[in-house]
Image (cartoon, rainbow, N blue to C red):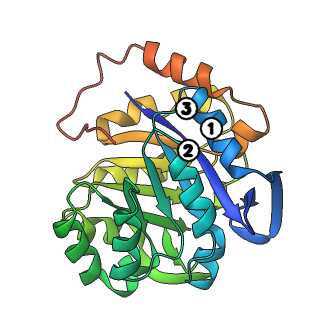
Amino acid sequence: MIEIIPAIDLLGGKCVRLHQGNYNLVTEFSSDPIQQALIWQEKGATRLHLVDLDGAKTGKPVNDLTIKAIKKELTIPIQIGGGIRSQQRAEDLINTGIDRVILGTIAIEKPEIVNKLSSKYPGKIIVGIDAKDGRVATRGWINQSKTKATDLVKNLSQSSISAIISTDISTDGTLEGPNLDFLKDIASVSNVPVIASGGIGTIGDILSLLPLEHYGICGVIIGRALYDGKIDLTEAIRVTKNQNINDITSQNMGTC
C-alpha cells in the first residue's frame, strides 16, 4: 500500500509552498506550523514530511526551534530535509529523535558521507533526488548539475539508505499530476523503495501511482493539494487503503 505523507515546508518559521522550487513564488498557508502538523496527525497521517526551505537555500539550520516543537507535540514519526550537508548535522537531528533525515545536495557533493551515515544509522537515512529535465538539482533547487537522476539512483542503491524521495521539480506545486514516466525510470533502477513527490493535485493522481508499486513506489508526499483543499487527507488514506492492488506484485515492492 502506498503511504500518504503530508508535507510542511518551513520558510521564515511559517508553513509555505513554493511553485516549481522558485523562492520568488511563495504561498503562505499557515503561520503556525505546529498546529498544522497536529491537524495532519489528527487526520490520520502515519508520517510527517518536513522541509527547512531556509536551510536548503543557505545550508544552515534556521528552523530548529520550530522543528523541535513539532517533534515534541507529535506521536507519529517525522522525516526532515533541507540544508543537511554534514554528517554532524544529520547526527544531531537523529539524536533529537527525528525518525529519518533526508540528504540531498550532499549526495552529489560528498557521497561518502551518505555511505557512512546509512551504515551507522540503518533505516534512518533517505536521499532526496530533485531533478529537472532528468538532471539533479542541488542547493535548494538553485543549482542544476550535469548528473542524471537515474545515474545517481544507481550509485545510491549500492549504499544502505532506506529510501529515495524522487521529485520532478517541473511538476512541484503545480497540481497538474505527477511525472509518471520519470518516477517509473527512477524506481526501475533503484534497489530501495521510492517515495514520489511533486504534482499531486487530486485523489486520481494518487491512484495513478498504484501501478508503479510494481516498480517499488512505496509512498507519496502531498503538499499544496492538501492546503488548497483539493485533497482531503483522511479520504485519500481511506481510498488508498481500500484500493485493490492484489494483482500488482513485485520483488521490488517495499514499505516506506
Task: Identify the mark nearer the N-term, 3 or 1.
Answer: 1
Q: From the viewer's perspective, is 171 left or right of 144?
A: right
Closer to us: 211 or 60: 60
The image shows residue 109, relative to residue 186, as above or below, that is below
Q: Residue at x 52, y 78 (%)?
A: 138
Residue 103 at x, y = what percent? 41, 70
| Residue at disc 3, secondary structure | helix
The image shows residue 230, relative to residue 9, as above or below, that is above
Residue 158 at x, y = what percent? 17, 66
- Check contact, mark 3 vs mark 2: CB within 8 A: no
Q: Callout 2, which amino acid? A: Glu
Q: From the viewer's perspective, is 81 left or right of 43?
A: left
The image shows residue 54, relative to residue 39, as above or below, that is below
Q: Quadrant of the C terminus?
A: top left
Q: Callout 3, which amino acid? A: Ile
Q: Say which mark, if any, is on residue 121.
A: none
Question: Does residue 176 appear anywhere in the picture?
Answer: no
Q: Quadrant of the N terminus?
A: top left
Q: Say which mark, if any, is on residue 73.
A: 2
| Residue at disc 2, secondary structure | helix
Residue placed under numbered mark 1 in the picture = 38
| Residue at disc 1, secondary structure | helix
Distance from disc 2 to disc 1, alpha carbons, whole Å, reads: 7 Å
Q: Say which mark, if any, is on residue 206.
A: 3
Q: Residue at x 61, y 66 (%)?
A: 65
Q: Nearer the viewer, mark 2 or mark 1?
A: 2
Q: Callout 1, which amino acid? A: Leu
Task: Identify the mark nearer the N-term, 2 or 1.
Answer: 1
Q: Nearer the viewer, mark 3 or mark 1?
A: 1
